[in-house]
Amino acid sequence: MATTLTATNQEYIPQKWEDVACPFCGAQEAHLIEQFGYEHRYRFVKCEGCGLAYMNPRPAYTDGFVETAYEVYTTSVDSFQKGDELTEQGKIVYQEYSSNLKEIEKWVGRKGRLLEIGCNTGFFCKVAGDLGWVPTGIEISQTMAKLAHDTYGFETRAGDWMGMKFEQLFDVIYCSHVIEHIPNPREWMARFKEVLAPGGVVCLSVPNYQSIDRKFKRGLKNLGLRKDRWEKWRTPDHLYEPCEKSILSFFESCGFELLQQYTYPSEWLGDVSLWHNLMHFKLRWGAKARYYLRPAR
Ligand SMILES: [Zn+2]
């Protein structure tokens, strides 16, 4: 850890930049909507075609970028579990994941094989295993994949999942706050279809660029009333942040049918008050968005 940018508080300087078209629809036309990051060196533009906010130009998606970007996500297993005991935070997250898994079961109609892409240190897969699912976790970071496997014992694989072969199909693909980090989302959606069992469902969660919180902070920033608290070592690892319009047309063009969508706050345990219903189910103004999808027939 001592040699990382984080530990030494060194500045992250992209070695190479690339100009890209919209990662969702491929359109070239876009206009600047936000500058962000350390010394505002990164730009989000809005696609004229589908409305997606994406970074352009962006640091080339090289091994060096990925390594630096993911280093900060190496969360410790200890934050959820110490020995055999769940921590206080672990208990809350356990409930959150249990509630999410109940909802998934409702859509799939059974418990079966679950593939989590971007499983971090494995806590979601652990909860899934406890509740009777058979989890497989994929993690780009070798360190986190090993930690997940050594702690919880389920099948984990490290690396880029696009080239991996699987013996069996999966009833669920679970991908939470991962897809906005990758440059080739269309290829991922196509691969989801290949590894899903008949009747299988994708549960995909992403940040919501149109959330009321994001809009408010952007407004303050544009008026010069708010600064980015952006550490200089940090990479711009969200390559895009979807709004509802952009992601729904993306799903459709990739051949997926939408089963359910809503937004949700951090540590949401599945309870729906009148306020929650309005804010997250009707208006969908929350900071995070979740989509249940199935390949279109
Ligand atoms: Zn687009």
Image (tube, grey):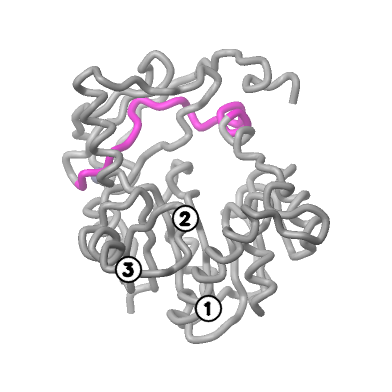
Q: Are marks 3 and 2 in contact (CB under 8 Å)?
A: no
Answer few, some or many: residues within 10 Å of disc 3's Cα (few below 14, many 20 plus, some between 14 and 19): few
Mark 1 or mark 2, earlier in chain: 2
C-alpha separation, residue under disc 3 versus residue under disc 2: 35 Å
* Magenta residue check for 283: no
Residue 26's place in the image compared with 116, above or below, is above
Q: Which residue is mark 3?
A: 273
The stretch of residues the image draws in magenta is 50-68
- Disc number for residue 197: 1
* Magenta residue check for 58: yes
Find residue 98 and report its image quarter: bottom right
- The amino acid beneath tag 2 is Trp
Where does residue 282 sit, x and y in percent of width and height? 22, 64
Find residue 195 and report its image quarter: bottom right
Q: Which residue is mark 2?
A: 188
Q: Is residue 235 left or right of residue 83?
A: left
- The amino acid beneath tag 1 is Ala
Q: Specify the quarter for ligand 1.
A: top left
Mark 1 or mark 3, earlier in chain: 1
Q: Residue at x 40, y 25 (%)?
A: 18
Q: Residue at x 44, y 53 (%)?
A: 187
Q: Is residue 10 left or right of residue 282?
A: right
C-alpha separation, residue under disc 1 versus residue under disc 3: 35 Å
